[in-house]
Amino acid sequence: MFATLHRHFTRHPALSLRWPLTVIIIGLMGMIDSGYLTYSHYAQTVLPCPTIESVNTCQVVATSVYSNILGVPLALIGLGFYATIIAIGLISLKEKFQFALNFIPPLAALAWLFSVRLTYLQFFVIHSVCYYCIFSALLATILLVMGVMMMRKIDN
C-alpha cells in the first residue's frame, strides 16, 4: 500500500510535458465557457443560443431553479473548478511537482458526476439544452479519461 502511495505522490518521469499542458488547455477552455456564463448571469444578459420554437434553450436552462446552489450560480462554481484545474496543470509543469496531477482524476470524477446529473435535468426535467453546459460536461469527460490514462501510465 505504501509503495503505491509513494509511486503516486512523487514525480512521474513517465509523464511527459504534454499531460500538464493538455490539462491547462482544457482548463482554459472551461474557464472561458464558465466565465462567460458567470458574466452573463451577473450582467443579466441573454445568452446567444439557437432558438427552438422561439425559445432560447440556453437561457431557459441558465435561469432555471437548478442553475444555483444555495444562491451561488453553477457557472461560478464551474469557474472555480476550472481555475483549480489550471492551477494543478501549472504546478505540475515543474517535474518535482507532477504529483499534483493525481488530483485530476478525483476532481474530474466529481465534475463528471455532477455534469451527468445536470445533463439529465436539462433533458428530462427542464426540457431544454444549454450548449455551454454540454460543452463543460464534455470537458469534464475528457479530463476524467485523461486522469484515468495518467494513472495507468504511472502504475506501469
Image (cartoon, grey):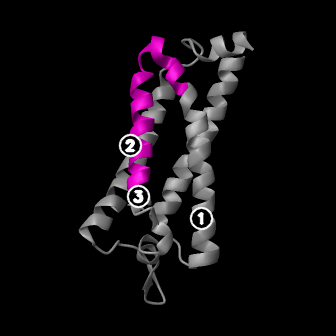
Picture quadrant where residue 109 is located: top right
Secondary structure state at the residue bearing disc 3: helix
Q: Quadrant of residue 145?
A: top right
Residue 154: percent from left, percent from top? 65, 19
- Residue wearing tag 1: 119
> Residue 80 magenta-drawn?
yes
Q: Main secondary structure of the magenta part?
A: helix
Q: Residue at x 62, y 17 (%)?
A: 8
Three-letter code, disc 3: Ala
Q: Is residue 53 above or below residue 67?
A: below
Amino acid on which the number 2 mark rests in the picture: Leu
**Residue contact between numbered discs 2 and 1, judged by CB atoms under 8 Å:** no
Q: Which mark is residue 28?
A: 2
- Label 1 crowding class (10 Å Cα cut-off): few <14, some 14-19, many 20+? some
Q: Earlier in the sequence, mark 2 or mark 3?
A: 2
Residue type highlighted by circle 1: Thr
Query: As drawn, is 83 to the left or to the right of 129?
Result: left
Residue name at image x 57 percent, y 41 percent: 108
Q: CA distance from mark 2 to mark 3?
A: 14 Å
Give the secondary structure at mark 1. Answer: helix
